Image (spheres, helix red, strand yellow):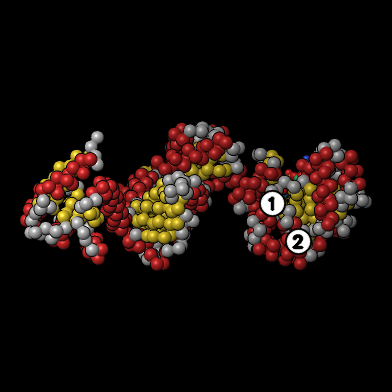
């Protein structure tokens, strides 16, 4: 099939023109031509249509090649210009080619014409494509330069090669500063390491990564971006560069944050609102369900809130709510949540409690803290609160049910005269009430002289001689009878009553010890239990000194028993207190050894004299092999550390024999004697 070809001939001879056309037809073209002889004709023809090629004679009467070439070039169109002539000088050929002619042919040798045109047409096409490519490239680079997004191009290792002006504007880094660096330079540190690892891992695998990142400007300010990281591959399919295009989304992020705050926080107090409270409660419920621990929800209402609002106005009421919110926050730990439910109503979530009664301690503290006056706009306001407590999973494991329960309990607290707390469950309420009345009674024990000390002998294993006695507290209640020691000791510790009670114990024990020594046991010492609260109170050293002075007991005859929990917090004051006691000559024992969770390293740090193995490890000796292993390990370790070892709870001859054979220094337990009232004790050891 012949190819159409539009030919513009600059030629004065029609015959020559026909020859050329013939040659073109033979060569497979379907030429369509116009012949011109003058400059105006040429201009007109050029303006009429698009030409594929201009073939120009060399010698024209009215016209010359040079002008023809110039006229064609003026149009700006890329049309091959081929000169045909008779004889011509080589120098002229060079000159015309330089001027822009594409080829030169001899009229007598037209065989070259067709191949020359074919070549020129191909070249035109190549030039056209290149021009288009350049234009595209130009457009693209303009687009990148003027882009409203930041653009970073890195090499295959991620080192920055190019950043666009928007990048400079947003980050404050100039191209010079940033070139050759890793984009990490923008890292705000907020983004988790895994995210940044995932980003580069994805990119290195040749895939695109997109996501939100938080970056940092040169001046340190943070900003959020939505980033697209794409690898660019070379012709071999290898990644040669990475392009990172980002869009500043700080605005959107801030709006999101604000929306989140509006949806989840109370405007007035900035505390979590009901919605967020439900969310956190849901999490606490799940955790309590999966573990053996408890969660509690407490609702709190300011008793006289409505009255304050009505009499003093909204502003004062709002101020009070803010102050109450703040004070509530001070009452809780970081894992707990205070939220405002609305009106004068707040809630506290206690997500992780070992015992449900911890909620009671928090409730009491809240009540105490809120009882202090509030100062709002020159008003001194006194408030009381009613608290309802429900415990998960005991009372339910659904957030909605728990909230209802807490409110029911809170209503009960209001009915019972406000300024109070109530548990939802009857059983717990009863227990709480009992504890409360126990506490009330316990406060009076000292004045009513209901406390007594019982004594249990401590025996030297090797000789079976009584060397000391442990003073054990007993509460003889007029109606309750003998109250179980562990029960009232825990109430005393919780309420702080243990400090005055402990003082009484110490003074009494020292006095009775001297009495005992004077009754014929001059070398028998006394062991007194001290609660952590006493050790931490800062008054123990002074108190011990007074008790010794008053009674005349020698310090080496006093042994203070403390439990591991004393050492748990590892406070320098604790070490100092114990060191001072040791310096006075008093001995210190570690009681109930093995039941705490603290690390053993504290044994070296504290000045212990004796280690008392808890009776839980003694009861099944020597048949329980685990206990055997444990007791033997403790004995070896204690000897190494230069500590004496005492085994508590020795009840059988077999246990006594076993422990004696293992070089346990001291023994104590029902096998020798139960704890006895002072007089009976004297008879027993006599
Ligand atoms: P503890 O200091 O470990 O006292 C030993 C407990 O084991 C005493 O219980 C004692 O009666 C009991 N016991 C002794 N031998 C045996 C035995 O062979 N078998 C069994 N099953 N038990 C034996 P108690 O008197 O009920 O005291 C319980 C805990 O209360 C004491 O444990 C101590 O931690 C605390 N405690 C007692 N009196 C005081 C005190 O005056 N102040 C303080 N802070 N705590 C005290
Ligand atoms: Mg003890
Ligand atoms: Mg003990």
Q: Does residue 50 appear in the picture of this structure?
A: no
Point 65% across, 39% down: residue = 479
Q: What label sits on residue 50 in the rendered view?
A: none
Residue at mark 2: C-beta within 8 A of ligand 2: no
Kindly identify which residue carries mark 2.
Answer: 607
Does residue 483 lie above or below 514 as drawn?
Answer: above
Point 52% across, 37% down: residue = 286
Q: Secondary structure at mark 2?
A: loop
Residue at mark 1: C-beta within 8 A of ligand 3: no
Does residue 358 lie above or below 163 as drawn?
Answer: above
Kindly identify which residue carries mark 1.
Answer: 598
For residue 109, side relative to residue 220 (left or right): left
Which residue sits furthest right? 463
Which image quarter holds the N terminus? top left
Of residues 186 and 180, the one drawn nearer to the viewer in this rendering: 180
Of residues 378 and 686, the one drawn nearer to the viewer in this rendering: 378
Of residues 79 and 515, the one drawn nearer to the viewer in this rendering: 79
Residue 531 point in image, percent of width and height? 68, 53
For residue 553, side relative to residue 505 (left or right): right
Residue 188 point in image, percent of width and height? 45, 58
Point 70% across, 44% down: residue = 485
């Amino acid at each position: 099939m012949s190819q159409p070809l539009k030919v513009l001939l600059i030629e004065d001879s029609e015959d020559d023109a026909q020859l050329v056309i013939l040659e073109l037809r033979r060569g497979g073209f379907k030429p369509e031509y116009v012949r011109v002889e003058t400059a105006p004709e040429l201009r007109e023809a050029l303006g009429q249509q698009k030409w594929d090629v201009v073939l120009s004679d060399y010698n024209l009467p009215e016209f010359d090649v040079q002008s023809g070439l110039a006229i064609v070039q003026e149009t700006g169109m890329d049309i091959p210009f081929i000169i045909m002539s008779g004889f011509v000088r080589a120098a002229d050929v060079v000159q015309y080619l330089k001027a822009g002619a594409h080829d030169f042919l001899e009229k007598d040798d037209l065989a070259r014409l067709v191949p020359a045109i074919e070549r020129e047409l191909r070249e035109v096409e190549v030039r056209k494509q290149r021009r288009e490519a350049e234009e595209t490239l130009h457009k693209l680079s303009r687009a990148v330069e003027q882009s409203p997004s930041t653009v970073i191009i890195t090499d295959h290792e991620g080192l920055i090669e190019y950043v666009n002006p928007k990048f400079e504007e947003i980050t404050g880094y100039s191209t010079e500063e940033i070139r050759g660096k890793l984009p990490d330079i923008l890292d705000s540190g907020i983004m988790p390491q895994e995210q940044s690892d995932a980003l580069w891992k994805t990119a290195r695998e040749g895939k695109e990564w997109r996501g939100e990142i938080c970056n940092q400007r040169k001046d340190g300010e943070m900003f959020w971006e939505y980033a697209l990281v794409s690898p660019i591959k070379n012709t071999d399919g290898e990644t040669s560069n990475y392009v990172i295009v980002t869009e500043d989304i700080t605005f959107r992020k801030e709006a999101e944050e604000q929306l989140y705050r509006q949806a989840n926080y109370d405007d007035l107090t900035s505390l979590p609102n009901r919605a967020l409270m439900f969310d956190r409660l849901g999490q606490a419920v799940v955790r309590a369900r999966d573990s053996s621990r408890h969660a509690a929800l407490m609702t709190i209402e300011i008793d006289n809130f409505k009255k304050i609002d009505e009499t003093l106005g909204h502003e004062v009421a709002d101020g009070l709510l803010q102050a109450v919110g703040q004070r509530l926050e001070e009452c809780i730990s970081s894992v707990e949540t205070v939220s405002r439910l609305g009106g004068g109503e707040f809630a506290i979530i206690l997500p992780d409690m070992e015992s449900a009664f911890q909620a009671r301690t928090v409730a009491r503290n809240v009540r105490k803290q809120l009882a202090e006056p509030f100062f709002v706009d020159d008003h001194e306001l006194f408030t009381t609160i009613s608290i309802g407590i429900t415990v998960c999973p005991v009372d339910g494991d659904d957030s909605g049910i728990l909230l209802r329960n807490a409110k029911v309990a809170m209503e009960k607290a209001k009915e019972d005269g406000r300024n109070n707390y109530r548990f939802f469950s009857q059983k717990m309420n009863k227990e709480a009430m009992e504890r409360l009345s126990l506490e009330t009674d316990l406060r009076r024990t000292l004045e009513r002289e209901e406390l007594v000390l019982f004594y249990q002998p401590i025996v030297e294993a090797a000789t079976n001689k009584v060397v000391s006695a442990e003073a054990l507290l007993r509460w003889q209640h007029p109606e309750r009878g003998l109250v179980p020691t562990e029960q009232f000791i825990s109430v005393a510790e919780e309420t702080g009553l243990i400090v005055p009670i402990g003082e009484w114990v110490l003074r009494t024990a020292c006095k009775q010890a001297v009495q005992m020594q004077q009754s014929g046991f001059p070398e028998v010492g006394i062991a007194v239990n001290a609660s952590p609260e006493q050790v931490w109170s800062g008054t123990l050293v002074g108190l011990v000194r007074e008790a010794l002075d008053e009674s005349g007991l020698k310090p080496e005859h006093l042994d203070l028993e403390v439990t591991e929990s004393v050492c748990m917090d590892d406070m320098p004051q604790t070490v100092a207190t114990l060191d001072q006691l040791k310096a006075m000559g008093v001995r210190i024992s570690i009681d109930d050894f093995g039941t705490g969770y603290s690390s053993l390293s504290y044994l070296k740090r504290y000045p212990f004299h004796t280690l008392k193995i808890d009776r839980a490890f003694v009861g099944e000796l020597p048949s329980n092999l685990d206990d055997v292993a444990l007791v033997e390990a403790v004995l070896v370790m204690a000897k190494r550390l230069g500590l004496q070892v005492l085994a508590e709870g020795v009840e059988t001859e077999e246990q006594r024999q076993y422990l004696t054979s293992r070089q346990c220094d001291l023994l104590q337990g029902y096998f020798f004697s139960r704890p006895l009232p002072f007089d009976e004790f004297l008879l027993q050891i006599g």
